Image: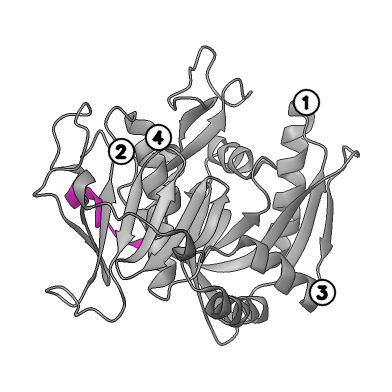
Amino acid sequence: MTQFLAHGHSIFGAGWLQKVLDQSTSCEADRLSSETTASLGSLQIDQLPLREVPNVPADDWLVRRIQGLSVAKGRYGVLLASSCGCRATIEPSDMPLSKGGRRAMRIYRPRGLDAASFRRTCLNVFIPQALALLGNTLLHAACVRVGDKVLLFGGQSGLGKSTLAAGFSSRGYDVFSDDVIRVESENVSATAFRGYSGGYLRAGSFLLPTGTTSEISGEPKCWFDFGNGVTGVSVAPVAAFYFLGRSRQTAVKIEEVGPAGAVHVMLRSLLMDGLDREQRGREALRRTTKLVAAVPVYSLKYRRDSRHFDAVLDAILAHAQALVR
């Protein structure tokens, strides 16, 4: 599967995915090999044949088309449906665990879907949602290591998380992830786990080499490799969470967010769409409250302009380095 999910070798703190990557020889295949299995802690990943994709009754849908993802829950367990046609099922929690004590996740890739779209769906959507269902905390955020700690950058899609990650990478900083990061908090500290060593930038970004073309069908997105800054560090304490916002001013504005506002910010960044609505609310509040107690939250606003991008990075580093000393 190397051509299916390339660049995902150390996702979320484990080298599990390489076991899957090494078992496929053709990027033209339309589904996972029937022998392909990967493990990540309590999660086991297998192929889902088209004939076994559940037919979902209308009442089973929990989420419909939120940023391209729909979620249903029924006798089949949890179904994740991407707008690109991929499907994933996570077996019901009341079913006996598979050999090794793992919960099974099965993924279907539709015929003809390009490898980059499939890779992105698995790494950015299906696997994070499955891990969240198993009790892990996943945030929609970029993560960059500065010194011995990491900085998290959250915010709505399109605000520049991947651009910041690519900018820091171009300066030699170690990027843990550009889009989804696993974070676990204990007492008054939080730890982030490395994701995959690259991300997607919009075609035409000033950070991409001239002439770079889009890899994903229907989306002007291009892969940017963060490998130049990768070290052997896979786990690091979190120094701060920056929530991105827009500004008409060129100057960078960083302000600390109070506890109530910080919880709201974290809730907006949390990935856990697979839980029932009632359970989701309680569990989301519990996880975000723990994170806010462990990590300072700041609003980060600036005008997006390539001419001033270096100054933006300098301002963020100046603020962050005062935190990580």
* Residue drawn at x 90%, y 38% as measured from the top left: 248
Q: Which residue is mark 4?
A: 117
What whole-number distance in Å separates the C-alpha atoms at marks 2 and 3? 40 Å
Q: Badge 3 local density, few (<14 within 10 Å), some, or many (20+)? A: few
Q: In the displayed image of the protein, which residue is found farthest to the top?
A: 211
* Number of the front mark, 2 or 1: 2
Q: In the displayed image of the protein, which residue is found farthest to the right?
A: 249
Q: Position of residue 83 (x, y in %)?
A: 47, 41
Residue 240 placement: quadrant = bottom right
Q: Which residue is mark 1?
A: 307
The amino acid at mark 3 is Gly
Type of secondary structure dominating the magenta stretch? helix
Tell me if residue 6 can be seen. yes
Q: Badge 4 local density, few (<14 within 10 Å), some, or many (20+)? A: some
Q: Which residue is mark 3?
A: 258
Q: Which residue is mark 2?
A: 6
Report helix, strand or loop for mark 4.
helix
Residue 172 is tagged as none
The magenta span reads 13-20
Q: Is residue 155 left or right of residue 85?
A: right
* Number of the front mark, 1 or 3: 3
* Residue drawn at x 23%, y 78% as measured from the top left: 95
Report helix, strand or loop for mark 2.
loop
Pointer 1 with pointer 4, Cβ within 8 A: no
Of the residues under marks 1 and 4, which one precedes in the sequence? 4
Residue 11 placement: quadrant = bottom left
The amino acid at mark 2 is Ala
Q: Badge 2 local density, few (<14 within 10 Å), some, or many (20+)? A: some
What whole-number distance in Å separates the C-alpha atoms at marks 2 and 1? 32 Å
Tell me if residue 144 can be seen. no
Of the residues under marks 2 and 1, which one precedes in the sequence? 2
* Residue drawn at x 30%, y 55% as measured from the top left: 54
